[in-house]
Amino acid sequence: MNLSTTHLTLRDCPLNSYTVVDLSLRRRIRKRRMDEPSHDATQAERRQRFLAEASVELLVHAQQGDDVALDVLCQRYIPLLQRWASGRLPNRARDLLETSDVVQETVIRTVRNVKNFEVRRDGALLAYLRQGVMNRIRDEARRVGRKPVEIDLPDAPVERDRGPSPLDALIGRESVAIYERALARLKPLDREAVIARVEMGMSFEQVAAAIGKASANTARMTVNRALVRLAEEMAHDS
Amino acid sequence: MIHDPHRHHRLRLAEATPEGSSGDGEADARWLELADQISRGESVDWAAAGLTATDENDRAILRSLGSIASITQLHSSDQALNAGAGDAVTDADADDAVTDANARGVFDTNLEQWGRLEIKERLGYGSYGTVYRAHDPQLQRDVALKLLHPGKQLPEAARERLRQEGRHLARIQHDNVVSIYGIEEHEGQFGLWMELVRGRTLANIVQNDGPFSESEGIVVGQSLARALAAVHAAGLIHRDVKAQNVMRAEGGRLVLMDFGAGTTPDHDAQAGTQRSVPGTPMYLAPELLRGEDVTPASDVYSLGVLLFHLVTGSFPVTATSLDELKAMHASGNATSAADLRSELSPAFVNVLRTALASDPSERFATAGQLSQALDQLQHGTSETQLNTAPTPNRRRRWTLAIAALAALAALTLTSQLNLFGPAQFTVEGRLLREDATSRTELMSGAAVGVGDQLSFELNPSTEVYAYVVNVDAVGNAYVLFPIAGCETTNPLAAETTHRLPGICDGVDSSWTVDSSGDREQVLVVASREPLVDLEAKLASLPAAGGNGAYVKLDDQSLLNLRGIGGLSARPSGTGAKPGIFDEIAELTRGPSSTEGVWVRRIDLNNPK
């Protein structure tokens, strides 16, 4: 890994209260929490303040070494991305891989590596994180595809290749590819709107905050127009 | 939040510009409306949306929106939609979801709702789709919902075809056909919902409980033939009639299901070369393997395979590949049900043969004809079948003889043998029981007892040679006519009512039932020409002992008759066994033997 762009030594999401699916990670976190000194009042205050802060602001703090900011980012994105990833991971890969590790590693790497000018909106950070997780999934899928692994599913049909992700199974692999290509061709704002609402399931209020719109209603209209453009792009491709 | 009208205004302007510049016009209003439904997580009426599509581009956009809707659904299926970014599913929830998905091997979304239907449980999974038990809250009833696999991106033409089939299916009102309630598209997923039938498939029953008895097979066949007739009457061809697609409901009702491969004949023609062969290979009519069009007759063939499978547990033609299957069909290499299960009645075996005829023109032309043939059978066999005591040692040999006779008996379906052209004469004939005061006609299924006096009344339109043979339940065969030493003999004059056996030793005679047995078959054959080979055999027998005495056929005679049992075996030119056409030709050989043979069979019960 190229570490030249960062002076940080982040290796894990620092603390604490976000819920994760993976039990082993949770155990690790609990252990860590017991090992660490209790938070001082300043930390609690900062946390409170950061919770209301935009992610792009937290990113700056985190990159300057603020564990609380990083923690809030983790809390904000890990469950979201984890949920998202479960729909994008091939079944086999999902069995073999701790989704949360992929997501957590990606969040840490992104926070470490991303340049501020690349992510001026929270929605952009989210899209960036999503892309990072997507790339990791592809890496993992390739890895899993190469390496025969015993899996404990006696009755399940064993796929010879890496197997379809839930999304592949839902709309077909080709349609997923078309969708991804079309999404990549959208203007950043449109792409972020689609990702925030369609893929991450954010409320329109949250979408509005993420893409800098004044109201949920405005955000909704932005999402809708983005969906139409996306469909048009997909139609050209198919 | 402080309301800042200027900011609002600016934002609106800012957004209006790219929208205008990107060329989005009025045409997009309908897409925007759909997009709004998708982004809100509402269900979309895709069928209605499809109606607004005017060209291929519209349809492509609709398909794309359908995919986006699916993606939205996927990502919201774990209740993520509208959840706060910090909210998350519990460990247990997530574990369950993952475990469940893994256990199924194929992930399907945690679908809870499709249209107005609430999805309750998954019932089955096939190549076309998944079947769920769902609840219709409006009508307060459970239904079966079949959702096509969302991965199946159907072209609009196929979707329209499905809709049309749904309309056709909905028109079919038949007790033995599953009732279709509706066909629609929601969230890009095509679904067909229908009555929920609780029970087991026939395939499951055969697999777990063993083959059906003949009488059961006949009852099933009657129901299904009528069901198919209703399907055909609605302008549809089922195309996938098989044991897996018939349910025996808990109350015993038989229900033909699964029109996944169904088609309308004209649409099929339109589909042209793109058509792939649907259905299960063993059930496929041979003409479909040759690339010919599906017809009602191909459904009849499949039903024949189904009935064959029900009573034997096997298939008439088996192969491990499509090529092998084609080759088997091409060489006429079909197994007779009688070879697999010797106690089947010859008549039933022959109905199967006719249903399974390789050449569609030799098959029952309609499901209705098959139904009729089974109706006729039921009178003759449904009761006797239950009474038949197995006699394992002798059964097989004698059954071959029965089969031989039945090969002729099958021709009673049309009353005339058409193999060599239609018979150029007609015969009125009936079997009678007589006593001092009355004469009763005996139809198939009638009971006789020891001491009963029987005769056969026959009035041919032309001079004929008649032969009457009786086979009892254990397979003993007897010549009833002509009897050496009796005055009444062949040929029998035209336009005259003859009473067989006729005058023997100057006395008007009858056949007397002198022993009991489970079942008696009486076979009557009439021909314009003497059936010389058969006659030779009969003539070589010892003279009858007296009035009404039975004459037992010797084994050699039975062997000669046995060849006829291979009615289904078309002359292949390679086999050592002579084909039926050779046999019949042999038996009907005469000076100008082109006029056919008249045959009638009557099955009687002769209880002990």
Image (spheres, rainbow, N blue to C red):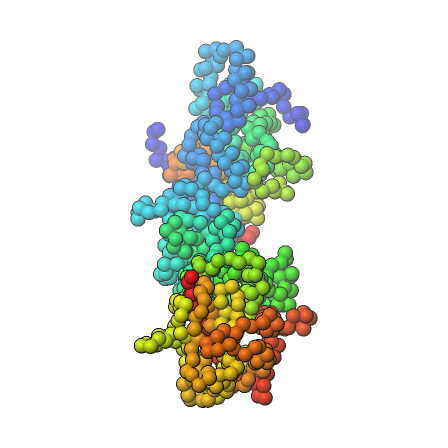
Vertical comparison of B119 with A18: above or below: below
Query: Left or right: where does residue A206 sit relative to residue A126?
Result: left
Q: Position of residue B350 (x, y in %)?
A: 51, 68
Q: Nearer the viewer, residue A113 or B250?
A: B250
Q: Position of residue B135 (x, y in %)?
A: 36, 45
* Residue at screen point 55% across, 16% down: A32
Q: Position of residue A161 (x, y in %)?
A: 63, 42
Q: Position of residue A206 (x, y in %)?
A: 43, 32
Q: Nearer the viewer, residue B6 or A63?
A: A63
* Residue at screen point 44% across, 19% down: A49
**Where on the picture, by quarter, is residue B519?**
bottom left
Q: Nearer the viewer, residue A161 or B494?
A: B494
Q: Nearer the viewer, residue B179 or B551?
A: B551
* Residue at screen point 61% across, 68% down: B332
* Residue at screen point 35% across, 28% down: B1
Is residue B494 visible to us here?
A: yes
Is residue B18 visible to us here?
A: no
**Where on the picture, by quarter, is residue B84?**
top left
Query: Left or right: where does residue B286 sit relative to residue B31?
Result: right
